[in-house]
Image: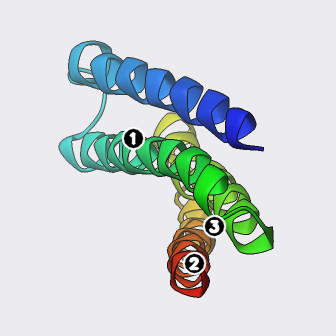
Amino acid sequence: MERIFFVIGALSGAISVAAGAFGAHALRERLEPRMLEVFETAARYQMYHALALLLVGYAATRWPGGLTTSAGWLFVAGTLLFSGSLYAMTFTGIRALGAITPLGGVCFLAGWVCLAVAAARS
């Protein structure tokens, strides 16, 4: 499992860097400032949780089990829901997609709690 989370985390980090560069260079002139901010938030949280997935990969070697694995999948789901909804909202202009974003935030929070409990129980 640790290898899977390392791979997903590394790829997500690469996508985040590409998104950040794309936002800074290609979107700056095309988006209103508020939507550019939304895009940058998506890229930033994607990077935070790409790094968190690398941490989960390491944690899975120290504290293997359901909670560590759950943390990893919650970070993946959170990235897809949180950052994905913000990216989609930026490109489509459909602001209703912002209603999905908090679900991703809940996944992020739950992932961090799972990781903390896994470490505390070890």
Question: Looking at the rendering, which quadrant does residue 100 occupy?
Answer: bottom right
Residue wearing tag 3: 100
Badge 2: residue crowd in 10 Å (few <14, some 14–19, many ≥20): some
Scheme by which the image is coloured: rainbow
The answer for how far apart the CA atoms under marks 3 and 1 are is: 19 Å
The residue drawn where x is 57% and y is 39% is 92
Q: Eyeballing the image, is 94 above or below 13?
A: below
Task: Please state which amino acid type lies under the numbered disc 2.
Answer: Val
Foreground pick, 117 / 27: 117
Residue 108: x and y, percent?
Answer: 53, 68
Residue wearing tag 2: 106
The residue drawn where x is 80% and y is 70% is 66
The answer for how far apart the CA atoms under marks 1 and 2 are is: 17 Å
Image quarter (top left, top right, bottom left or bottom right) of the N terminus: top right
Helix, strand or loop at label 1? It is helix
Residue wearing tag 1: 47
The residue drawn where x is 78% and y is 67% is 65
Image quarter (top left, top right, bottom left or bottom right) of the C terminus: bottom right
* Mark 1 vs 2, N-terminal side: 1
Foreground pick, 111 / 16: 111
Foreground pick, 10 / 95: 10
- Circles 3 and 1, Cβ within 8 Å, touching? The answer is no
Task: Please state which amino acid type lies under the numbered disc 1.
Answer: Met
* Residue 91 located left or right of residue 72: left
The answer for how far apart the CA atoms under marks 3 and 2 are is: 10 Å
Which residue lies most toward the top here? Answer: 26
Task: Please state which amino acid type lies under the numbered disc 3.
Answer: Ile
